[in-house]
Each structure stands twice: as structure tokens, then as C-alpha cells.
Amino acid sequence: MNSGRRFIGLLVLLCLVRPVSALDLRQSWELMQAQGPTYLSAGHERDAALENRAIGQSGLLPKIGITAFDNHIDGTQRQPDFFGNNHTNDLNYASRGATLQLRQPLFNKQKTAEYRQGKYQAEYGTAVFDGKAQDAAVKLAGRYFDVLLAHETVELAKAKLNSFNEQVASTQRRKQLGDGTITDVDEAVARRDLAQAELIEAEDNLVVALRLLQEYLGQAPDDIATLQDTFPTPPLQPDNLQAWIIRAGTDSPSIRARRLNVNTADEEVAKAKAGHWPTLDLVLGYTAADSETLSTQNQRNRYTSAGVELNIPLYSGGYVSARARQSVATRNQAEEDLNATRDEIISGTTREFRGVQSGEARIHALEKAVKSSERSLDSSKKGFLAGTSTNVDILNAQEQIYTARRDLFEAKLRYLLAKLRLAANVGALGDDDIASANAYLGPRLSLSF
């Protein structure tokens, strides 16, 4: 018994001391789905839109209602008799009753249009949610990557500041030994001061980037996963822009939503024009009343009724015609919005496709630039000792290294973000795309200050 308790205690201790993995992009996506206010808001909007299906259908289903009354009559009644003489009677009685009525539409073009419109509005809500969910995933990745870039910028700014501090100390020593000039010292100090200002700005940007990420996650992470050293850039599948454009035109949530909006507007036109059409309802009723009227005092009435009710609109002051013209204009606007969205999606797909394609080449070019910048710095230092390079050459080479490293880090993040945006444009961004981008992450990055 005691050994079992010791074993359980050991397991608990191991769980407590086991290092907790850093928050990565996939976990961030799951966290945002669970508690992110932006994502949850989109979900509530979708749930509200789905109810339009039941709302539209309700117009074609029976309506059942009860009307009840309980009145007290107090007054006088004057009645002539056979000889023409008026007699006055005091009235003091209770009048009670209730009517149960069922109304079932038999022919109603307006309600039929509302039924079809409700289905389109429900599908529109789903399409809007799909678009917002994918847009939220892209924005989440963008804010996550902004934190990584801001942190990398801070680290590079610190390294650059340390490097310039060393250069300041080196030039001061050379001047003290009579082998340097005050100009060299001033140039190194100026670069050092600029690096200090850049570090302050970088730290501010990191704080802001973390706050923006917190908006999406609902909490501020302490540790997140950053980029791995290895960064493969496999070709797109398919690698043809036209194939992506065709897919976007078919599957894009934004285009699908706009298309459904046009369908909804079409039904609004049908609903408006239906104002000229008659309606026919089946009406069933049951009435129970006591002393319902003056002529039925002290009587208890129980009766049922069944029939059809025809309503023929003749003139509504021009409302129906004006409403029809208004709905036609709204439908035309919806069609133009669809065309504009289609053009926007095609442009966005083209931009992101080119971003992935050129991003691969840019990453390879910057990788070479980092290595060549490092060689340039070594050459500048050797040349300075040989008298062929100046202190400015060394400072410029150091500046170039850190700029190239930051540009390379940013290019990698832009490449990943372009792939996610491309998938979102064609309505295909899902957990697999998040997992694919997440595979580039690994090393733990502490965000504590």
C-alpha cells in the first residue's frame, strides 16, 4: 500500500517537474477556438444566422393561438315594447369567453419566398463563418509571427549594440595608443547611440505585438515556439497560378457568401412582388363564451368553425411597386459586390501565389547574403589591420550583417504567412495547413521581461 502511494507521488512529481512545452502555432489556434473572443464572436454570429432556416419555414407552418376575454358589463338598456313604449333595464353581468384558432397558409407567395430566403441566409451565415474563421487563423498566425519577428529584432538589436560597444572600446584604445583618431571614436559612438535607440524601439514593438496576440488568444503566453534553423521550401501543389484562381472562384468562402447574398436578394425581389398576389388560408376555430353579447345574455355558447380565408390586395398606396423597385436595386448591388469580391480574391490569390514563389527565392538569396556579409566583416577587420579598410567599413559591415539576418528571419515568416493566406483565399485553410506551418517551429522562446 505504501509503495503504491510512493509510486503515485513519484508520477505526480515527474509531471510537475517535466518541462512544459512552449506554446506553438497549432496550440495557439486551438486556444483561440476555445476562448478567443474574435473567433467565439464569429461562432455566435453563425449560430444566429442558422436560425433563419427555421424562421423562414415558420411562415408555411400552422399558427395556433388563443384569444380570451373577461369583461364586466355595467350600464342600462333601453328597449321599445310592442306599443312603442320604452323600457329601461339595468345591465350588470359578466361576459367571458375564449377562442382557439388554427391558421394554415394554403397559398402565399410571400411566405414561400421567405422560406427560400431563410435557407439562403442560413447558408450565408455558414459561409461568412468559414471566411471569418480562416481570416482569424491567418491573422492569428500574423500576430504570432509578429511576436517572433519583434523578439528576433530585439535580440539582433542587443547583439548589434554589444558589437558597437566593443567597437567604441576598440577605437578608444587605439586612440590612447596613438594609432587611432577622434573621428573613428565619434563614428563608433554615433553608431552605438543609434543602436541603443533601435533597441528601445524594438522592445516597445515587442510589447505591442504581445498585446495584439493576447487579443486573439484571450491570454498572454509566457513562452512560444520560434523558427527552427532548418527551413525547407517545397514547391506549391499545384504549381500553376490558374489552377489556384479556378479553385478560389469555386471554393472561396467570401465568393460563396456573396453568391448566397445574391440569392437572398433574388428572393427579396420575389417577396416584394408577391405583394400583388392574393393569399389563401385555412382557418379552424373553437369558441367557448358566456354572455358573449347583449343578445346572448345568460347563455353559454360552444361552437366550432372551419373555412378558408381569401385576401386580395387591391391598392396599397404604391408601396408594393416601390418596394419591388427597391429590392431590384439591392439585388443589382449584390451582384456588383459579388463581381468586386471575385476580382479581389483573384488579385489576392495572385499576390499570395507570387509571395510563396518569390519568397522561396528571396530566402535562398538572403541566406547567401548573411554568409557573404559575415565574410565581408572578416575581410573589413583584416583590411583595417592591413591599412586597406577604415573604421567606417567595419561599422558598415556590422550593420549589414544584422540587417541581413533580420531580413532573412522576416522573409521566412512572410513565406509561411503567404502559404496560409493562399490556402485561405481558396477556402482550404484548415488544421493541416496550421500543422504544416507549425512544423517549422520548435525552439522555446521566453517572453518574460
Image (cartoon, grey):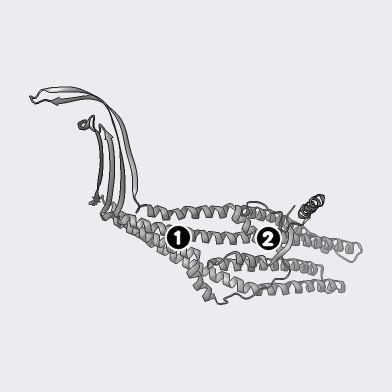
Quarter of the image for residue 195 reads: bottom right
Indicate the amino acid at tag 1.
Glu
Quarter of the image for residue 190 reads: bottom right
Q: In the displayed orientation, state which residue is furthest to the left.
A: 83
Establish if 399 lies above or below 99.
Answer: below
Image coordinates for residue 244, horizontal then vertical, percent:
53, 73
Q: Residue at x 80, y 71 (%)?
A: 377
Q: Are marks 2 and 1 in contact (CB under 8 Å)?
A: no
Circle nearer the N terminus (2, 1): 2
Query: Label 1: few (<14), some or many (≥20) within 10 Å?
Result: many
Residue carrying label 2: 24
Q: Residue at x 69, y 74 (%)?
A: 364
- 418 with respect to 53 (left or right): right
Residue carrying label 1: 123
Q: In the displayed orientation, state which residue is furthest to the front.
A: 1
- Given residues 211 and 234, the one toward you in this image is 234
Is residue 329 in view?
Answer: no
- 135 with respect to 444 (left or right): left
Image coordinates for residue 110, horizontal then vertical, percent:
32, 55
Q: Residue at x 33, y 41 (%)?
A: 66
Indicate the amino acid at tag 2.
Asp
Image coordinates for residue 315, horizontal then vertical, percent:
23, 51
- 390 with respect to 362 (left or right): right
- 244 with respect to 399 (left or right): left
- Given residues 235 and 370, the one toward you in this image is 235
Q: In the displayed orientation, state which residue is furthest to the bottom.
A: 240
